[in-house]
């Protein structure tokens, strides 16, 4: 095996950071380079749709490592830089500005990107929520007191509806399934969630899909549903799921399909691994929600000695999950997108949710 | 066993509550950790260790 002197991590969020932690903890003393598309150092995404959007948590509080802890990892942090190409044979990653990074080992942790509607993209007032910047931009718009329509009633959509309603805004939640969270929790619990939203003053349009967004003067003015209902809107939040951020790997030759296909140890090819939401690895559990728990390696505790550890990382952590539900299911999740219909978020929840906080935050009271 | 939390590091992920609900809770207003029991009994040791392990912000320290 060639010397492993330089490991490049592409992706500067939870999975990339956890991988860096694990490498240093396991004694890797070589060069670590982390490439991140956003300008912020690694931060926590789940609060974005809740306390950050509500304005009760200062944005800097989402930072996952304070400066001193980050420096302890001795990483060359390349933030605001986007990887655009991987050559596995030459072992190089190319960045958008043309810089080329040679690596001995590579960890792909580029996560997910929000799915968008095929129309209305040029209209002001149409938002997605995945990054801190997007959360702060949306919050700034909410301060003007707009009428809000949230499209998509999975975890993220219901959270955003609850949070915006807690700010006293006029909020309508649109979802294709009979109840909010039907894909995640079933219609029985989803019905309770629906009741809670309505008691809190969120208007629900369930069992409906969106067919168009109308604009006036370059800004969104209404959401059109499949029964021709017109919902007036000043701000629209699209929360219809997410897709793995693998566009930069399209010509790499790596196996892709609902993420980067890897084995049960997250290896994609010799010396190349995938981690976090972008990794599609075989696992018997049908659990589907993207979560912290699939970060592949414990961040702050040495691994158990080999004789006590299972070769299957899933067996070590019962909360590990795979989006695909198994090695045979590699259909790109976007293939089931029928035109502009908002998808149930069973497979496509955008944020990395922690269930405890997600569930409690579906009520405006808890999100306020 | 003694549990020490660092509120400044906490990002309100809620993983600790899932792992050890008798020891950790979250503030309603911002989701930041609340330590219910800084000296949990030994039979909660595994849960508390798990909570520390899961914390994405490394905000939990367990002293034995």
Image: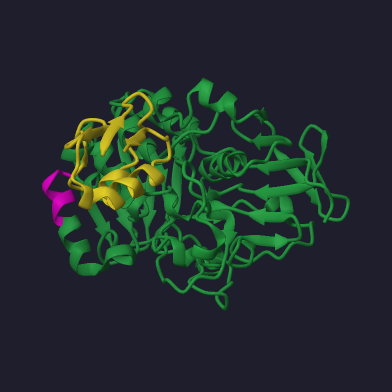
Give the quadrant of residue A243: bottom right
Q: In the visual, does A31 lie left or right of B19?
A: right
As drawn, A65 above or below A94 = above
Q: Residue furthest bottom?
A: A328
Determine if the magenta segment contains residue A9.
no
- Given residues A289 and A135, the one toward you in this image is A289
Does any portion of residue A322 appear in the rendered image?
A: no
Does any portion of residue B62 appear in the rendered image?
A: yes
On the image, the x and y values in percent for residue A364 come to 19, 40
Give the quadrant of residue A24: top right
**Chain B rendering hue:** yellow
On the image, the x and y values in percent for residue B14 come to 30, 43
- The quadrant the N terminus of chain B occupies is top left
As drawn, A141 above or below A195 = above
Which segment did they paint magenta?
A195-201
Which chain is in green here? A
- Given residues A160 and A125, the one toward you in this image is A160
On the image, the x and y values in percent for residue A263 come to 63, 67
């Amino acid at each position: 095996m060639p010397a492993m002197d330089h490991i490049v991590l592409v992706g500067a969020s939870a999975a990339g950071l956890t991988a860096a932690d694990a490498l240093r903890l396991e004694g890797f003393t070589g060069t670590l380079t982390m490439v991140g598309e956003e300008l912020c150092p690694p931060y926590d995404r789940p609060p974005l749709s809740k306390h950050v959007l509500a304005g009760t948590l200062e944005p800097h509080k989402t930072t996952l490592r304070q400066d001193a802890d980050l420096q302890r990892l001795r990483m060359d942090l390349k933030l605001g830089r986007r990887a655009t190409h991987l050559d596995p044979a030459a072992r190089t990653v190319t960045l958008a500005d043309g810089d080329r990074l040679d690596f001995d080992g590579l960890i792909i942790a580029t996560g997910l990107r929000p799915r968008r509607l095929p129309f209305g993209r040029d209209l002001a007032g149409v938002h997605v929520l995945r990054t801190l910047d997007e959360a702060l931009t949306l919050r700034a718009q909410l301060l003007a007191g707009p009428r809000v329509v949230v499209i998509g009633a999975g975890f993220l959509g219901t959270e955003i509806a609850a949070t915006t309603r807690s700010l006293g805004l006029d909020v309508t939640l649109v979802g294709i399934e009979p109840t909010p969270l039907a894909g995640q929790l079933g219609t029985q619990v989803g019905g309770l969630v629906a009741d809670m939203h309505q008691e809190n003053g969120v208007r629900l349009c369930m069992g409906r899909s969106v067919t168009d967004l109308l604009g006036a003067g370059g800004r969104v003015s209404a959401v059109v549903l499949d029964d021709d209902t017109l919902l007036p809107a000043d701000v629209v939040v699209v929360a219809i799921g997410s897709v793995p951020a693998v566009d930069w790997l399209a010509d790499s030759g790596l196996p892709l399909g609902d993420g980067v296909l890897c084995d049960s140890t997250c290896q994609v090819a010799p010396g190349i691994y995938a981690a976090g939401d972008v990794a599609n690895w075989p696992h018997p559990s049908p659990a589907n929600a993207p979560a912290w728990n699939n970060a592949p390696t414990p961040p702050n505790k040495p691994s158990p000695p080999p004789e006590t550890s299972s070769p299957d990382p899933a067996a070590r952590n019962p909360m590990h999950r795979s989006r695909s539900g198994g090695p045979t299911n590699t259909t790109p999740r976007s293939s089931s997108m029928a035109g502009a219909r908002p998808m149930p978020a069973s497979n496509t929840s955008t944020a990395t949710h922690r269930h405890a906080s997600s569930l409690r935050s579906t009520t405006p009271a808890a999100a306020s | 066993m003694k549990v020490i939390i660092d509120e400044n590091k906490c990002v309100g992920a809620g993983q600790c509550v899932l792992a050890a609900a008798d020891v950790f809770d979250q503030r309603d207003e911002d989701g930041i950790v609340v330590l219910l029991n800084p000296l949990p009994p030994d039979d909660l040791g595994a849960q508390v260790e798990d909570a520390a392990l899961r914390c994405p912000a490394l905000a939990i320290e367990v002293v034995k």
